[in-house]
Amino acid sequence: MTTIGFIGAGLIGGTVARLAVAAGYDVVLSNSRGPATLADLVDDLGPRARAALPAQAAEAGDLVVVTIPLRAYRSVPVAPLDGKVVIDTNNYYPGRDGHFRELDNGSTTSSELLQEHLPRSRVVKCFNNIVWWHLRVLARPSGSADRSALPIAGNDTAAKAMVTGFLDRIGYDAVDLGSLAEGRRFQPGTALYAQIYGGGRADYFDAPPKPLSAEEIRRAVTAALR
């Protein structure tokens, strides 16, 4: 795995791309507004980065990160992602995305909607429960005492292993919470959402980042299930 494709290049996508480049990956960035709008980000990331159309980024990536507003998930190109591992960073925010009845009634999750849209891809949920600047500054080399972990969820064991390896290289441990449906355990409003990386503060976006170990994530999940 040498190239990471990005469908969406906002704050989370740009941060993951930055971590990936620092770890030695090539990145291909795309958004809905065209490659020219990504020139500044590509210049900032350096020679390992280039911009493309979404279908081209999907085709180029050995691993592809989908990081767009949920309301636009049906715009993700399907055929270029056949057989590929796709990281889904999305969250459901009704005020932004409009209402999805199946999400409001809890019968499915946002990542399962993307998996349904990409039936021949292997979707893994990750990066949705941490704010971008915490994600950027909490990365640590493997073995560091203050290394943080991120939860993941997916239906394919090999896909989750691939994502775990990617996380390790960019500075994070992974905690596998199970099937894609279990992604609901780190969606907005849960104990594992972004405030946990801000020391539990309600104003987590402005709070100093707090390292969060894999064991702390497991304890938080166990406590939430009681």
Image: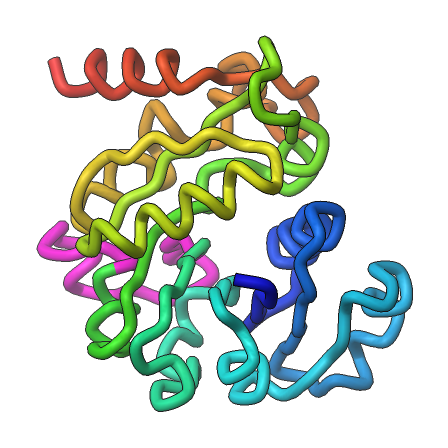
Q: Residue at x 33, y 36 (%)?
A: 186
Give percent across and percent down for residue 212.
Answer: 50, 17
Name the residue rendered at 15%, 57% in the picture.
108
Can you tell which quarter of the image residue 216 is in? top left
Q: Quadrant of the C terminus?
A: top left
The segment highlighted magenta reads 90-111
Residue at image x 19%, y 41%?
182
Q: Is residue 200 magenta?
A: no
Residue occupying the point 85% across, 68% down: 47
Residue 28: where, in percent of width, then height?
A: 66, 73
The answer to whether 222 is drawn above or below residue 36 in the figure is above
Q: Is 199 located above or below residue 167 in the figure?
A: above
Picture coordinates of residue 138 (x, y %)? 65, 26
- Give the farthest residue toward the front: 1
Name the side, left or right, on which 34 lies relative to 143.
right
Is residue 92 within the magenta segment? yes
The figure's colour scheme reads rainbow
Relative to 46, 49 lies left or right? left
* Quarter where residue 223 is shown: top left
What x and y, as percent, mark residue 88? 40, 58
Pick whichever, 159 or 139, lies toward us. 159
* Relative horizontal placement of residue 46, taking residue 97 as reference (left or right): right
